[in-house]
Image (cartoon, rainbow, N blue to C red):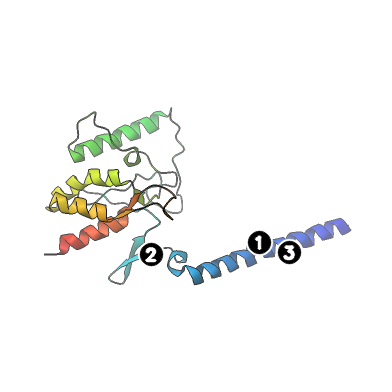
Amino acid sequence: MSTLLTALRLFLALTVLTGALYPLAVTGLASLLFPRQAAGSVVTRDGRPVGSELLAQEFTGDRWFWPRPSAADFATVPSGASNLGPTSSDLVAAVAARMAVFRAAHGLAADAPVPAELVFASGSGLDPHLSPDAARLQAGRVARARGLDPACVRALVEAHIEGPQLGVLGEPRVNVLRLNLALDLIASTP
């Protein structure tokens, strides 16, 4: 019986320590050291939240840079991958359909390569970034749809390329939300 009571006390102590005190301490420390990131890296426009740098959101239509597809339709609660394997006929059909839509929207030949990130959903379904090449490939379509100089839109893409974190972690990338918000600013400037 004493072993059971000792185990129960240890269980309760560890539950309080690791389930309450540690998370509260880490959250408090993060809020002090990194307040913007701890609050979700919310992006605001005119004092209103318009999204988060950390979560993709759906942009449709030719006037926008498109993010990676989302298996969860950009919903945060059921986020995740489709769990379809490489031999899945559903995955093959979804990728073929996405490639056809992308090629048609960009005036590409039926056999032109399309960046994988634009036809395969990310593991979380909420990846907010594209590679610079995937963003550059969309610049012509966006410029035509908005009546902008293609060179101006390409320069905007180049200005929004983020380097690897800490100079070594990851690849260069473009945050789609930030890019589309900047696009709105230049499009509304006379």
Residue drawn at 68 percent across, 64 percent down: 17
In the rendered view of the protein, which quadrant contains the C terminus?
Answer: bottom left
State the image quarter where residue 39 is shown: bottom left
> Mark 2 or mark 1, which is nearer the start of the sequence?
1
Position of 30 with respect to 16 (left or right) is left
The percent position of residue 186, horizontal first and vertical second, equals: 18, 61
Mark 2, residues whose alpha carbon is within 10 Å: few (<14), some, or many (≥20)?
some
Residue drawn at 23 percent across, 51 percent down: 64
Residue 18, which numbered label? Answer: 1
Above/below status of 143 relative to 178: above
Residue 13, which numbered label? Answer: 3
Residue drawn at 46 percent across, 53 percent down: 77
Residue drawn at 27 percent across, 47 percent down: 135
> Mark 1 or mark 3, which is nearer the start of the sequence?
3
Look at the numbered disc 3 and give the secondary structure of its residue: helix
Amino acid beneath label 2? Val
Mark 3, residues whose alpha carbon is within 10 Å: few (<14), some, or many (≥20)?
few
How many angstroms separate mark 1 from mark 2 (CA)? 28 Å
The percent position of residue 60, horizontal first and vertical second, equals: 26, 49
Mark 1, residues whose alpha carbon is within 10 Å: few (<14), some, or many (≥20)?
few
Position of 106 with respect to 87 (left or right) is left
> Mark 3 or mark 2, which is nearer the start of the sequence?
3
State the image quarter where residue 81 is shown: top left
Residue behind mark 2: 42
Observer-nearest of 183 and 151: 151
Amino acid beneath label 1? Thr
Observer-nearest of 65 and 82: 65
Amino acid beneath label 3? Ala
Residue 92, which numbered label? Answer: none
